[in-house]
C-alpha cells in the first residue's frame, strides 16, 4: 500500500482501462482499530502490509457499486461492515452497521449522506475535519481538478449540486481522496469550490 498525505493513511489502487483512471481504497490506521474504505482486492504484498498494520476493525462502503472486495477483507480481518442506510433494503452484502448523515461510527470520522448521485444516500467521510473521502459523486478525471459524476448517471442534478454545496461549506478540508481518479492532497477546499464555480449556470 502507498502512504498518503498523513502517516496514518494508506491507499491501494487498481487501474480501470475502460475509464482510463484509477480506482482507490483507503486505510486509516488507528489505535482503537483500523478503518478500511471501499476496499479493492488485495495483492499478496498489500495483504501482508495490511496485516502488518493491524488489519481492520471496520469496513465502510460508500455505495453499492463500491462493495468490491469487502466480503473477502471482512473475512480476512474480522471487521464489521458498514453501508449506506438509504440502501439497506437492497444492499448486495450483509452489513452490521448502517450509516446516515451525521453519524460517527468511530471517533474522528463523520459521515455525510449525499442525494442525487447514482445510488441513494451515497456516503462521503470526513476524517479529523480535514480529509474528505468520496465514493462516486465527486471524482477527479484529471490531475489537480475535481469533477462531478456525469449527468447521465445522476438521479437528480439539482440534488447532486446541493450535496456538493454541503462539501464546499467544509472550510477545513485540505485533502480530497476520491474513489475514482486523482487524489487532491492539498488545498482540497479550494478544489471543491473551483468545481462548484465551474458548474454555476448549469444546474
Image (cartoon, helix red, strand yellow):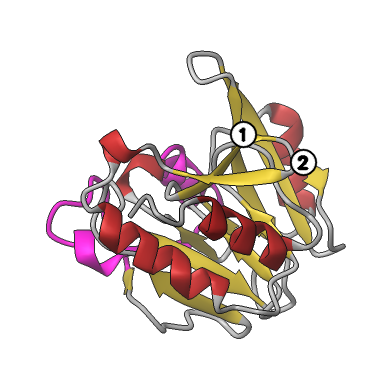
Q: Going by the picture, which residue comes out furthest to the top?
A: 17
Q: Give the camera-side residue of 139 and 56.
A: 139
90 on left or right of 130: left
Taking the spot 75% from the left edge, 52% from the top edge, the residue there is 10
112 on left or right of 141: left
Disc 1 is placed on an element classified as: loop
Whole-Å distance between the Cαs marked 1 and 2? Answer: 9 Å
Span of residues in magenta: 68-96
Tell me where residue 162 appears, x and y as whole percent: 36, 68
Give the image quarter of residue 24: top right
Tell me where residue 77 appears, x and y as whole percent: 56, 54
Taking the spot 58% from the left edge, 72% from the top edge, the residue there is 126
Give the image quarter of residue 21: top right
Tell me where residue 177 appears, x and y as whole percent: 65, 53
Q: Residues within 10 Å of mark 2 (few under 14, many from 20)?
A: some
Q: Residues within 10 Å of mark 1 (few under 14, many from 20)?
A: some
Q: Going by the picture, which residue comes out furthest to the front?
A: 201
Work out whether mark 1 precedes mark 2 in sequence or the reverse, and give the earlier one.
2
Disc assigned to residue 1: 2
Taking the spot 46% from the left edge, 70% from the top edge, the residue there is 165
Q: Is residue 86 above or below residue 144?
A: below
Q: Are marks 1 and 2 in contact (CB under 8 Å)?
A: no
Which residue is identified by label 1?
Answer: 42
Q: Give the camera-side residue of 7 and 147.
A: 147
Disc assigned to residue 149: none
- Residue 116: tell me if it is visible: no
Q: Going by the picture, which residue comes out furthest to the right?
A: 7
Amino acid at each position: 500500500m502507498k502512504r498518503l498525505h498523513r502517516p496514518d493513511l494508506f491507499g491501494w489502487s487498481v487501474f480501470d482501462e475502460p475509464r482510463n483512471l484509477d480506482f482507490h481504497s483507503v486505510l486509516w490506521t488507528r489505535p482503537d482499530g483500523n478503518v478500511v474504505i471501499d476496499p479493492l482486492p488485495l495483492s499478496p504484498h498489500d495483504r501482508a502490509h495490511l496485516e502488518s498494520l493491524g488489519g481492520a476493525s471496520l469496513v465502510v462502503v460508500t455505495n453499492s457499486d463500491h462493495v468490491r472486495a469487502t466480503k473477502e477483507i471482512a473475512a480476512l480481518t474480522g471487521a464489521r461492515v458498514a453501508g449506506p442506510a438509504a440502501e439497506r433494503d437492497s444492499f448486495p452484502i450483509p452489513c452490521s452497521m448502517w450509516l446516515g448523515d451525521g453519524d460517527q461510527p468511530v471517533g474522528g470520522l463523520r459521515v455525510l449522506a449525499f442525494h442525487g448521485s447514482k445510488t441513494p444516500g451515497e456516503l462521503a467521510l470526513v476524517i479529523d475535519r480535514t480529509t474528505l473521502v468520496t465514493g462516486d459523486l465527486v471524482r477527479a478525471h484529471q490531475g489537480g481538478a475535481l469533477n462531478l459524476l456525469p449527468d447521465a448517471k445522476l438521479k437528480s442534478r439539482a440534488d447532486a449540486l446541493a450535496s456538493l454545496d454541503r462539501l464546499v461549506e467544509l472550510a477545513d478540508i485540505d485533502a480530497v481522496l476520491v474513489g475514482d481518479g486523482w487524489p487532491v492532497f492539498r488545498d482540497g477546499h479550494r478544489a471543491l469550490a473551483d468545481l462548484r464555480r465551474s458548474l454555476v449556470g448549469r444546474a
